[in-house]
């Protein structure tokens, strides 16, 4: 808690799904440590931070790359220094491959880049923050860690296999931390977005729109970052307090098995 407001770290916070999550939590009364790779003086970051602090005045931004061990340590130290205690962590930071190549043409450089950020970086950031959370004084509520994965954790996309592999690994990471941290009063969840309107999907949005018009999703629209934000808020607010290790699909029903 900070000034009687719950506290949260959100990675990849300044745009897309991360922006939707962090703004939903800020509007719900959380103080947010927003983490992103862009420098704090970036024009888009400044605009985002102005919007964030307008509703959550003590919120702040830390620039860093979670795939870098030195940056991870600086992010963790800065987050706890600014928040005092951390009640929730939302692991949202992630990248897609720069070039969508068939898995028979995927390069080691692309594989390493995507997994270093999406999986390895997220794992070790969570490890560091979880240890600090365990050392905090007990709270009268269960603290929360959320991993934002993707339907790509279970759906094959052969032209971005490194992304699918990273999200499948992150899914197991969420389950492992759920098992390990329950005894310490920390619940862990995985949120799997479907097709969400972000920079990452902008280049293939026409394809997705055609698929949705053809019946891909029972709820016939593109998802919005705010849809993911509301799901994450319900978890951080403790509405699934007697559940941990659960997967929450935010996909318009896309993953419903059907004939």
Image: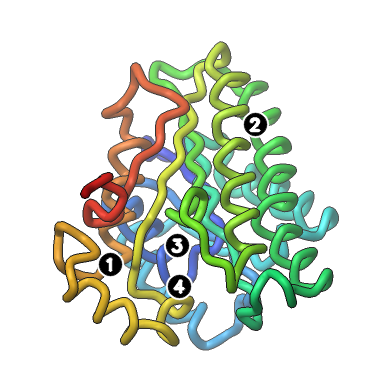
Image mark count? 4
Label 3 near label 4: C-beta < 8 Å? yes
Residue 236 at x, y percent in the picture: 37, 37
Where disc 3 sits, the SS reads: helix
Q: Which mark is residue 18?
A: 3
Image depth: mark 4 or mark 1 in front: 1
Residue 135 appears left or right of 202: right
Indicate which disc, 4 or 1, sits on the residue closer to the N terminus: 4
Indicate which disc, 2 or 4, sits on the residue closer to the N terminus: 4
Where disc 1 sits, the SS reads: loop
Q: Which residue is mark 2?
A: 130
Q: Which residue is mark 4?
A: 15
User: Residue at image x 54%, y 37%?
Assistant: 86
Residue 19 at x, y percent in the picture: 41, 66
User: Residue at image x 59%, y 49%?
Assistant: 82
Q: CA distance from mark 3 to mark 2?
A: 20 Å
State how the image is colored: rainbow
């Amino acid at each position: 808690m900070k000034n009687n407001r719950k506290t949260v770290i959100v990675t990849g916070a300044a745009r897309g799904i991360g922006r939707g999550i962090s703004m939903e939590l800020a509007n719900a009364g959380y103080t947010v440590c927003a983490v992103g790779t862009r420098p704090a003086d970036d024009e888009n970051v400044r605009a985002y931070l102005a919007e964030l602090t307008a509703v959550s005045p003590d919120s702040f931004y830390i620039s860093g790359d979670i795939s870098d061990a030195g940056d991870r340590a600086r992010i963790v130290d800065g987050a706890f220094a600014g928040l005092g205690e951390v009640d929730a962590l939302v692991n949202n930071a992630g990248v897609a491959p720069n070039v969508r190549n068939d898995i028979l043409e995927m390069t080691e450089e692309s594989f390493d880049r995507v997994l270093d950020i999406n999986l390895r970086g997220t794992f070790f950031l969570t490890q560091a923050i979880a240890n600090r959370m365990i050392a905090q004084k007990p709270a009268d509520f269960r603290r929360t860690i959320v991993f934002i994965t993707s339907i790509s954790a279970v759906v094959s996309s052969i032209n971005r296999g490194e992304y699918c592999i990273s999200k499948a690994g992150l899914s197991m990471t969420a389950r492992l931390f759920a098992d390990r941290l329950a005894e310490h009063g920390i619940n862990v969840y995985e949120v799997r977005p479907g097709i969400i309107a972000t920079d990452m999907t902008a280049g293939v949005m026409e394809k997705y729109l055609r698929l949705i018009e053809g019946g891909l999703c029972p709820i016939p629209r593109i998802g919005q970052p705010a849809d993911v934000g509301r799901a994450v808020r319900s978890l951080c607010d403790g509405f699934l307090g007697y559940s941990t290790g659960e997967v929450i699909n935010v996909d318009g029903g896309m993953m419903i098995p059907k004939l």
